[in-house]
Image: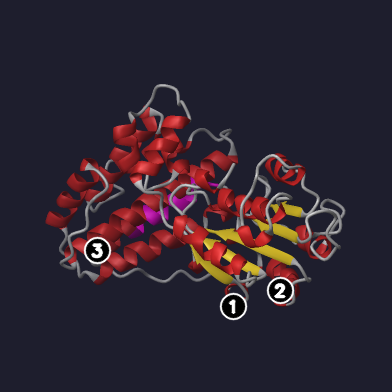
Amino acid sequence: MSWNEIRGHRHQEHLFRRAAQKDRLASTFLFVGPEGIGKRKFARQLARSLFCERYGEEELQSCDSCPSCQQVTAGTHPDLLELRKPNDKNSLPIGMFAGSDDYGPGLCHDIAIKPAAGGRRIAIIDDADFLSTESANSLLKTLEEPPPRSILILLGTSEQQQLPTILSRCQIVRFGPLPPTDLHEILAGLELEEGTPLEDLVPASSGSVQQALLLHPPEVFAFRTQLLQQLATLNPLEGDFLKSLLGFLGEKETEAALKRAKLRFIADLAIEFYGLLLQQTSGLNPDPPDSVSAQALAQARERWAAPTVQLASLIERTELMSSQIEMYLNSANLLGPWLADLSNLSHGRTLVPIEF
């Protein structure tokens, strides 16, 4: 794989290329942007380019054929450390950083070991949104004083999801959604089984391969339409919609990771909808992603009578729901209060603060 296969992030590539040419690469980075847009792929290509035995670091290129390039591709390079949240955990365990019987010496120890082959050590920490306070604290000293010739790259979805102690110690690199042409070409290259046509799928996927794959089954794409239409009524609880949401999530036996992905999809779609509605009611005219969104927004705009500030509260309430996904074992207990609050806020009613 080369930089030519990294779609939609040419600006970020140029930033790193200039820094490498001037020998001014930082030691700690936080990559933020939506899921499924290639942040992890970008980080691994950066590592491949820095480890490549044919090109010098200042060239930031990979030959893809030397032992180091092949090892990065295979995930076996001795100087590349990759961490991500286990599927059965709600956060990145502290043992991954401080060491434990389950995870060995831990990243903070391993990143300080003398490079075995690559001339430097590189760590890619996925799912940085799920750093617990304890895990973050164990990582702080390494972020503050990275070992010589080391790079740490944290991957998250937004700055708002990160702990202040992490934000203050990382150079932030922002990644945006993939352009429609790039997303279309990526999906076409995947040779997907028959499902939602690409001409419908691409506009509805918010520039994310992950979201496109989730929407590819026709029944999921149909659910997206149903959810937008329900939000447009400004009464999300109407018609026992909670039952429809729970049906979309699947049975109790459904894999937890898939259920969480669907919950995040519901939250992200609602945030996008309310964000567009806020812009429209504020006098802006953003382009809806597709005709389904456009129709739902038009219906909601006709019915909207509450103060515009309530739309910001709808977004905040949905962001809160999204942040709680990992904490709830019972989806009904998460979604029921959320739908009720959306109905109240949509009609200008003030929510009673919940004490924990």
Residue 182 lies left or right of residue 89; in this view the side is left
- Indicate the position of residue 162 as horizontal and vertical percent values: 56, 68
- Indicate the position of residue 119 as horizontal and vertical percent values: 79, 60
Residue 176 lies left or right of residue 286; in this view the side is right
**Residue beneath the point at 44% across and 37% down:** 186
Helix, strand or loop for the magenta stretch, by majority: helix
Q: Residues within 10 Å of mark 3 (few under 14, many from 20)?
A: many
Residue at mark 2: 140
Amino acid type, mark 2: Leu
Local SS, label 1? loop
The image shows residue 17, relative to residue 199, as above or below, that is: below
Residue 248 lies left or right of residue 296; in this view the side is right
Give the image quarter of residue 81.
bottom right
Of residue 278 and residue 185, the one placed in the foreground of this image is 185
The image shows residue 202, relative to residue 104, as above or below, that is: above
Query: Mark 3 or mark 1, which has the lower sequence index?
Result: 1
The image shows residue 74, relative to residue 111, as above or below, that is: above
Q: Which mark is residue 168?
A: 1
- Indicate the position of residue 25 as horizontal and vertical percent values: 63, 69
**Residue beneath the point at 74% across and 76% down:** 145
Of residue 7 and residue 246, the one placed in the foreground of this image is 7
The image shows residue 232, relative to residue 20, as above or below, that is: above
Residue at mark 3: 278
Local SS, label 2? helix
Residue 109 visible, this orientation? yes
Magenta stretch, residue numbers: 330-341
Give the image quarter of residue 131.
bottom right
Local SS, label 3? helix
- Indicate the position of residue 139 as horizontal and vertical percent values: 73, 69
Marks counted in the figure total 3
Q: Residues within 10 Å of mark 1 (few under 14, many from 20)?
A: few
Task: Estimate the spatial distance between the alpha carbons at disc 3 and disc 2, rounded to whole Å.
Answer: 38 Å
